[in-house]
C-alpha cells in the first residue's frame, strides 16, 4: 500500500513551512492546514492522506479536539502528535483518544523519520491482520457452503462467471445460501475491492424501494429535506445484489430495466441522468418465469436478468454438508458468545441428519446458535422430533446460570424481557418453517404487520 501523502496541521506558519521542506526532502507529498477546522473540512470532502502530523496546542480547535473529530471520520488514519516539553498529561490524553505516536518539539530530522516509519509499519501490520482475518472468514464460508458435489459444481460456474460482468440470477428456497453465493461471485471478480451493496426488495414498501435504489433530490416528496444518493450510486464500480427481486413492483422493474440496458437513471425528482458502472446480481425463491407468464413480473426484465442462472439446492439434498456447517457455526457462536462448546452432542447431530430442514442453512444456523447460548439440547430435540410448537414449560427452560451472584442485584424485568423474546423467537421460527420461509404468510398467521415481523426476526436474531 502506497503511504506517501502526509497532512500537516499546525497554526504556526513558519513551522509548517519548515516541516513541509523537511518532509518533501525525505520524499513525501505534503498538504498543509493552518487550523483544525480547515483540515476537518478537507477530510469530510474526501481528502485521504496516509498520515496526519498534528500540533496539540493551536488556536481555535485544539489538537485533541481535531484528533477526536478525525477519529469519527477516518477511524484508522495514523496520527502523530507534536507537543511541548511540559505537556505530558495532554499526550496521555491524546494516546487515549487514538494518537499513533508523539514527538516533543524541537526534534531532530532522524527522530521524525523514525516515528513516521514506525507508525506506518504498525499500520501495515494491522492491515495485514485484517486481510488475513477476512481471508480466514472467506475460507470458512467456502469450506461450509461449497463442500458437497452439487455445490462444488456451482462453485465451478461461479469461477467462470466471476471474471465477467454478466447478470446472474441465483434462485432457490429461503435460507439455502443465495447471498453467500452472490458474495462469492463478487469476491472472485475484478470488482472485489469495490463495494458490495445488498438490497432486500421485500424489506421495504414498494413506494420506498424505488427511492432506496435510485435516490432522490431535495423536495422530491414530503420529508425529502436534502438529496440522497441511492444504492446504485453507492455501488459504483462494484456489485449490487437485489435479494427477493420477485417482490419488486412493476413500476420499479421498469426503471431497473432501464439501468440494465442503458447504465443510467435519474433520481426521484431529478432531471439529470446519472451514469453508473455496476454489476447486478439478483436472487429469488419464486418462479420468475411463471410470474412473467402471469404478467406479475416483466417478461423483458426476466430475460435480461436470466443471463446466467444458478439453482442452489436445498440442504436436504446435500446433507453431507450438515456436519461441516454444524462445526462451523458451533465454533463461530462459541467465539461470539464466549461459550466453551467444542462440539455438538451425538444425539443432536443424529437428529440434524434425519431432519428435512425446510428453513435450510439458516434454520440450522439458528438452532446451533440457540444451543450454544442455552446449552439445552432438549429444546431442539423436541422441536425436531414433532415439528410442532414446544410446550411452554420446555420453550422457556432457559439457562439462567450465572445471573445470580453473591452481592449482586438482578432485575426481574430484564429476565421477563429475555423470556418473552426467547418465546417469540421459538414461535416465529416454527411459523416460518411452516410457511417454508414465506414472511408475508407468517405475518398473517401471527397477526402482526409484515414490517413488525421483520423487526422481530432481527430482534430475535433469526
Image (cartoon, rainbow, N blue to C red):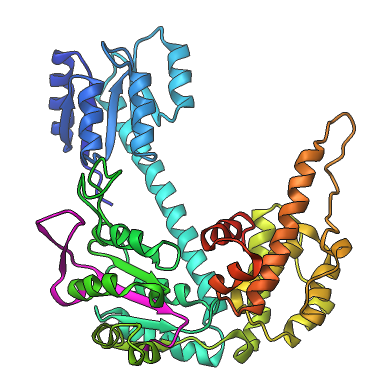
**Residue at figure coordinates x 43%, y 74% from the top left:** 244
Q: Nearer the viewer, residue 301 or 293?
A: 293
Give the quadrant of residue 65. Answer: top left
Can the viewer see residue 128 in this picture? yes
Q: Is residue 276 left or right of residue 285?
A: left
Left or right of 303 in this view: 170: right
Residue 243, image x, y percentages? 41, 72
Q: Residue at x 63, y 62 (%)?
A: 332
Q: Is residue 103 visible?
A: no
Q: Quadrant of residue 427?
A: bottom right
Residue 78 painted magenta: no
In magenta, the rendered stretch is 260-288
Residue 277 falls within the magenta-colored stretch: yes
The x, y position of residue 45, in whole percent, is 20, 38
Q: Residue furthest top?
A: 86
Q: Is residue 241 above or below residue 93?
A: below
Total numbered circles: 0
Q: Nearer the viewer, residue 441 or 273?
A: 441
Q: What is the x, y in percent for residue 152? A: 49, 88
Position of 257 compared to 209: left or right? left
**Relative to 15, does residue 268 appear above or below in the rendering?**
below
Position of the C terminus, as image quadrant, is bottom right
Amino acid at each position: 500500500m502506497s503511504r506517501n501523502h502526509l497532512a500537516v496541521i499546525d497554526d504556526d506558519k513558519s513551522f509548517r513551512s519548515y516541516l513541509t521542506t523537511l518532509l518533501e526532502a525525505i520524499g513525501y507529498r505534503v498538504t498543509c492546514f493552518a487550523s483544525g477546522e480547515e483540515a476537518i473540512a478537507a477530510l469530510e470532502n474526501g481528502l485521504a492522506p496516509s498520515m496526519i502530523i498534528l500540533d496539540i496546542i493551536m488556536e481555535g480547535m485544539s489538537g485533541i479536539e481535531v484528533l477526536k473529530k478525525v477519529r469519527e471520520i477516518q477511524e484508522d488514519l495514523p496520527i502523530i502528535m507534536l507537543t511541548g516539553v511540559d505537556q505530558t498529561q495532554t499526550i496521555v490524553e491524546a494516546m487515549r483518544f487514538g494518537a499513533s505516536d508523539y514527538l516533543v518539539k524541537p526534534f531532530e530530522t532522524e527522530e521524525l523519520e523514525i516515528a513516521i516509519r514506525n507508525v506506518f509499519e504498525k499500520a501495515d501490520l494491522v492491515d495485514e491482520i485484517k486481510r488475513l482475518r477476512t481471508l480466514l472468514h472467506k475460507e470458512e464460508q467456502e469450506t461450509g457452503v461449497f463442500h458437497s458435489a452439487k455445490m462444488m459444481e456451482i462453485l465451478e460456474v461461479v469461477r467462470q462467471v466471476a471474471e465477467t460482468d454478466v447478470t446472474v440470477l441465483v434462485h432457490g428456497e429461503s435460507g439455502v445460501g443465495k447471498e453467500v453465493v452472490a458474495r462469492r461471485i463478487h469476491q472472485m471478480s475484478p470488482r472485489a475491492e469495490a463495494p458490495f451493496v445488498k438490497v432486500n426488495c421485500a424489506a421495504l414498501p414498494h413506494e420506498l424501494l424505488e427511492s432506496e435504489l435510485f435516490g432522490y433530490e431535495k423536495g422530491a416528496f414530503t420529508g425529502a429535506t436534502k438529496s440522497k444518493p441511492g444504492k446504485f450510486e453507492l455501488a459504483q464500480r462494484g456489485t449490487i445484489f437485489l435479494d427477493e427481486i420477485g417482490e419488486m413492483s412493476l413500476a420499479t422493474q421498469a426503471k431497473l430495466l432501464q439501468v440494465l440496458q442503458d447504465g443510467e437513471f435519474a433520481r426521484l425528482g431529478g432531471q439529470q441522468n446519472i451514469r453508473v458502472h455496476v454489476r447486478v446480481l439478483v436472487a429469488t425463491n419464486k418462479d420468475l418465469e411463471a410470474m412473467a407468464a402471469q404478467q406479475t413480473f416483466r417478461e423483458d426484465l426476466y430475460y435480461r436478468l436470466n443471463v446466467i442462472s444458478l439453482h442452489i439446492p436445498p440442504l436436504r439434498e446435500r446433507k453431507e454438508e450438515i456436519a461441516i456447517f454444524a462445526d462451523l457455526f458451533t465454533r463461530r457462536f462459541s467465539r461470539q458468545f464466549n461459550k466453551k462448546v467444542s462440539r455438538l452432542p451425538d444425539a443432536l447431530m443424529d437428529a440434524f441428519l434425519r431432519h428435512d430442514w425446510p428453513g435450510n442453512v439458516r434454520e440450522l444456523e439458528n438452532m446451533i446458535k440457540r444451543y450454544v447460548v442455552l446449552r439445552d439440547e432438549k429444546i431442539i430435540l423436541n422441536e425436531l422430533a414433532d415439528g410442532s410448537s414446544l410446550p411452554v414449560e420446555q420453550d422457556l427452560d432457559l439457562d439462567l446460570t450465572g445471573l445470580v451472584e453473591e452481592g449482586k442485584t438482578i432485575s426481574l424485568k430484564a429476565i421477563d424481557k429475555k423470556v418473552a423474546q426467547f418465546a417469540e423467537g421459538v414461535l416465529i421460527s416454527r411459523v416460518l418453517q411452516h410457511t417454508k420461509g414465506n414472511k408475508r404468510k407468517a405475518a398473517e398467521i401471527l397477526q402482526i404487520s409484515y414490517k413488525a415481523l421483520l423487526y422481530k426476526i432481527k430482534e430475535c436474531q433469526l
